[in-house]
Amino acid sequence: MKIFDSLSIVLPLYNPHVGWEDELLASFRLLSSLFEGIDYKIVIVDDGSPTDLSASLAKIKCAEPRVLLHGYKENKGKGHAIRHGIKQVQAIYYIYNDWDFPFGVQPLRAIYDLLTTQRCDLVLGTRGKNYMKALPFKRKIISAGVRFANYLLTNFKIGDTQAGLKGLSNKARDMLLETKTNSFIFEFEFIKKVLKQKLTYTFLTVEPKPNIVMSNFKFKTIKKELITYIKLCFGNNP
């Protein structure tokens, strides 16, 4: 397949708040400045939002011609949405992130520079101390537990697998597309595959934007993800 762009940026989207499109377009203007002279595409994947986003998506597409719109009617989870988006494009490098850019847009340029200068297969955003302070108490406990389990059960050198910001080469892209987990815990499965194949990786510490509001998790979601995580730790498919 012919490679068209230097970079593809994939943004999963699910049921965003009112006014989200203007917030996203402001981020896109910053991206345009940061990536001036670089060919890139932005893939937005609507992961089955219950609210009709067609008017907002059309507004975004009109304002930013580099945007490609994809989606489906049934909510399938963040992992599925990111795989779906990455399948739609072919580039030299890929970055995926949450649509609201919780760490700002500058880290995306830093990740791109690491991919191109260090020639590594994967750049992992790792959440700094300020991010952990901003989390609701329940999410702090979950995050700390996952980091500890990563070291204890998998011998990972990588403690934080769930930052939601990653930069990939095509080798890492292939590993991502082999994952089966649909929810946000897919990153753990993805990184396990990267380590098994001995792909190269590096880190970028990221901090949250000022005044960011972190969402909380329902107990049902926590229970489901814990079961998936345990299965992945012991080498079983989710």
Image (cartoon, helix red, strand yellow):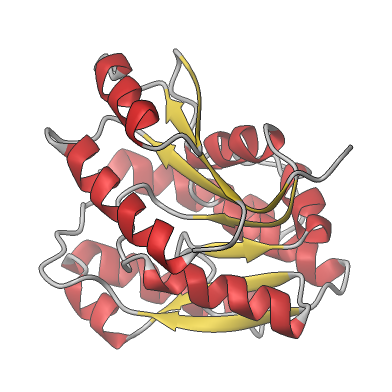
Can you say whether 87 is above or below 226 in the image? above
Expressed as whole percent of the image width and height from the top left, the position of residue 210 reads 15, 73
Viewer-nearest residue: 129 or 206: 206
Please say whether residue 134 is visible from this viewpoint.
Answer: yes
Expressed as whole percent of the image width and height from the top left, the position of residue 116 reads 71, 75
Q: As drawn, is 202 to the left or to the right of 172? A: left
Q: As drawn, is 70 to the left or to the right of 53? A: right
Expressed as whole percent of the image width and height from the top left, the position of residue 132 reads 27, 77
Q: As drawn, is 232 to the left or to the right of 13? A: right
Viewer-nearest residue: 7 or 38: 38
- Residue 153 falls in image quadrant: bottom right
Viewer-nearest residue: 131 or 19: 19
Q: Residue at x 54, y 68 (%)?
A: 161
Number of numbered tags placed on the structure image: 0
- Residue 103 falls in image quadrant: bottom left
- Quarter placement of the N terminus: top right
Q: Residue at x 44, y 28 (%)?
A: 47
Expressed as whole percent of the image width and height from the top left, the position of residue 168 reads 68, 62
Looking at this rendering, what residue extends furthest in the front direction?
Answer: 37
Can you say whether 49 is above or below 201 in the image? above
Can you say whether 174 is above or below 109 in the image? above
Please say whether residue 152 is visible from this viewpoint.
Answer: no
Q: Residue at x 38, y 36 (%)?
A: 13
